[in-house]
Amino acid sequence: PPQPRPATPLSEWSSPPIPDSQFFARDFMLAASMVIIQPSTGKVVVVNDTKRQSWFLPRGRKDVGENLEQCALREAYEESGFRAEFLPVVTYSRAPHAPQSATPDSNPVDPWGIGKNTEPIYITTQRWGPKRFGNGHVDNGGIYQAFYYVGQIPADAVREENTGMPDEQTYVGTLLDLEEALKLLSPSEGRVALMAYRLWKQTLELEEEARNKD
């Protein structure tokens, strides 16, 4: 039988492409996450589950009727205890500008001419399940897809207590230097955090370059 052609590689920052797929509602979850940067210190917020001694970026499933941006902000607050907001960065996005705002932000002048935006910088796809319940029912699992955004907190940000769900009360949001954060995060989340940080630094450099041209 004919063999499928090898998939064309994507960019160096992505996994190989996956086959075209279709999933019914019961077979997928949509989630959002946020890399929270404190620009005044250059530190990154990483959540520590003090019960399991695991470290991760705040992330969780979106609620019914909630959009992904709302989910990212809510999960950032619930799991880290910090009230974050989106951090616009210069990054390529396939999302078009709305007609009423077709002219992108001209400061900074960026390599793609699209200006700063707050679109997700990464998505990840994972398989979960299957799971057998006590009554004999088997859940075959499904696909968990998470969208990662870049956020920020001010210099005087204070972490609030008891912001998470009952099973998240051992979560503690911690400000760490990037190098330390990368040692504690999983390889996948480490790549996301590193990219968010690089995009933020690149944006600062482009803004400085634009100011020097004025």
Image (tube, grey):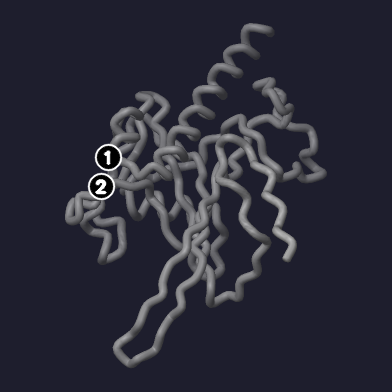
Query: How far is the residue under mark 2 from the one under mark 1?
Result: 7 Å
Work out which residue is located at the far left of the displayed protein and give it: 51
Residue 202: x %, y % from top left: 55, 22
Residue to which mark 2 is pinned: 48
Q: Quadrant of the C terminus?
A: top right
Element type at mark 1: strand
Q: Amino acid at mark 1?
A: Thr
Q: Amino acid at mark 2?
A: Asn
Residue 212: x %, y % from top left: 63, 7
152 horizontally vs 111: left or right: left
Q: Which quarter of the picture shows residue 51?
A: bottom left
Work out which residue is located at the far front of the displayed protein and give it: 1
Q: Residues within 10 Å of mark 2 (few under 14, many from 20)?
A: many
Q: Nearer the viewer, residue 173 or 1?
A: 1
58 horizontally vs 199: left or right: left
Q: Earlier in the sequence, mark 2 or mark 1?
A: 2
* Residue 35, placed above or below residue 200: below
Work out which residue is located at the far bottom of the displayed protein and give it: 135
Q: Residues within 10 Å of mark 1 (few under 14, many from 20)?
A: some
- The tag on residue 72 is none
Q: Are marks 2 and 1 in contact (CB under 8 Å)?
A: yes
Element type at mark 2: strand
- The tag on residue 174 is 1
Residue at x 51% of width, y 52% of height: 124
Residue 90: x %, y % from top left: 61, 30
